[in-house]
Image: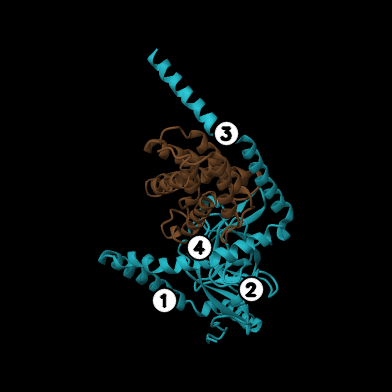
Amino acid sequence: MASLGGRERRWTGLDRLESRNRPPRSLLVALVLASITLVTLDVSGGASSPLEPARRAVGEAFGPAESAVATAVRPFTSVPAWFRSKGDLADEVRDLEASNADLKSQVELAGFERNRLEQYDGLTAAATDLGSALVPARVVAVGSRQSQSFTVTIDAGSAAGVGPDMTVVNNDGLVGRVLRVSRSTATVLLIVDPDSTVGGRVGSSMEIGFVNGSGSLDQAAGLDLRLVDDASVPARDDTVVTWGSASGPYEPGVPIGRITEVYSSLREASQRAVVEPFVDFSSLDVVGVMVPSGSQSDRALVEADGTLR
Amino acid sequence: MKGLRWAVAVAAVVVALVVQVSLFPHLAWHGIVPNLCLLVVVAAALTVEAPFALVLGFVAGLTLDLAPPADHVAGRWALALTIAAFLAARVRQDQKPSAMAVVGTVAAASFVATSLFALSGIVLDDPGTSVVGLLEVVLVAVVWDVLLTPFVLPPLMRLFARLSPQWATT
């Protein structure tokens, strides 16, 4: 009986609430329909979606704010590095010694690898011929996993000479490509995004294929490589670089990653390889955008021969 | 008063969004960050009249859809946050909500909003959506949002209540 009484009270309480704060069903329906209209407009519009101007306008407004907050936060993000213990440093020394030994053995195999080196030389020469320069930039905002896309904002925009479809690299390798720019910022699609496809070339065999993102920031999760020629088997520990043209979104000859595992799928009669990217996407900071040499920019450009201009 | 309240609400959404994309990635767990915009919307839904909260949910969602690092189909977060605001406004009671009620509402709203966003991705055929991955994202997002509730919700609710005395439930 007591519980019944309690329930009675609650219901009368709710009634009072209803009269005071009417559930705005019509407004809910209107807003849900508005959202669905937006989704439909954006999906059917594709690249020339009517929401692109809105995106650009919001980008112009938010870009400077994001850059400012990232700049303010930067001094604090380096604080954990001050508290590294002797154990951490010893671990690092051991890792570096291991990688040093690895590199030594690679140097000893240099003669064997001359053939490959010549091909790489050709590639770098091609890159120099294309005359690209780097616009230095820093990552100021990162899209959340909840939004299911792997994108970042960098603090270089159209004023720095950056435009859509340009290649973004860092000192380790390929980062992604520019999707859209505002005056002072640009949105970059990372190559780990499941939507991203990059033309890849296996370093030793020069076979071409396509590298797809796996949708994980984890470096070991890797990228998917599928070769165009089903008969060729990619080798483990081989380097994958981009192939493409100056007009395409990815400049040729940029290192993507190293093949860690090779699977042959009987069902699809093709070879699938896992490529571990050279870039650590969970700690991206300084990146460079490849722009044509001699383009106008609001900051110093890094030219192909290493000079600053 | 109404204009001032809108200004404060929009400012809160802008600050939440910028902090969410520029500060929290440094603390993120596998790229999952707390959804501060959702917390602002829930604070409004628990304090002021429902129509305001619903429209704020839509506006905050649209901002999340359009602001720079976002590259998904626009309207998905708008839909998710509108419905989260609707649910949070339903939970509201005549007396001031208890701490547990606030935390419960945040957890429920976070779960519903993140799941709705993920489901809309499946409907729109977004690649790279595995159910296990989605569950991980949704659960970690709920934990993040609940962890930040004690720091974000009380000041925001006090602010909204002060700006709308006729609806305040102190």
- Report whether mark 3 lies on the same chain as mark 2: yes
Vertical placement of residue A145 versus B90, above or below? below
Along the viewing direction, whichever of A122 and B75 lies nearer the viewer: B75
Which of the two discs, 3 and 1, labels the residue nearer the N terminus?
A: 3
Q: Are marks 4 and 2 in contact (CB under 8 Å)?
A: no
User: How dense is the environment of label 4, judged by Cα within 10 Å: few (below 14), some, or many (20 and up)?
Assistant: many
| Amino acid under disc 1 | Lys
Chain of the residue on which disc 2 is drawn: A
Q: CA distance from mark 3 to mark 4?
A: 37 Å
Q: Is residue B131 something that shows in the picture?
A: no
Q: Which chain is cyan?
A: A
Residue behind mark 2: A251
Q: CA distance from mark 4 to mark 2?
A: 24 Å
Q: Are marks 2 and 1 in contact (CB under 8 Å)?
A: no
Which of the two discs, 3 and 2, labels the residue nearer the N terminus?
A: 3
- Image coords of residue A206 (percent x, y): 64, 70
- Disc marking residue A141: 4
Q: CA distance from mark 3 to mark 2?
A: 55 Å
User: How dense is the environment of label 2, judged by Cα within 10 Å: few (below 14), some, or many (20 and up)?
Assistant: many
Residue behind mark 1: A104
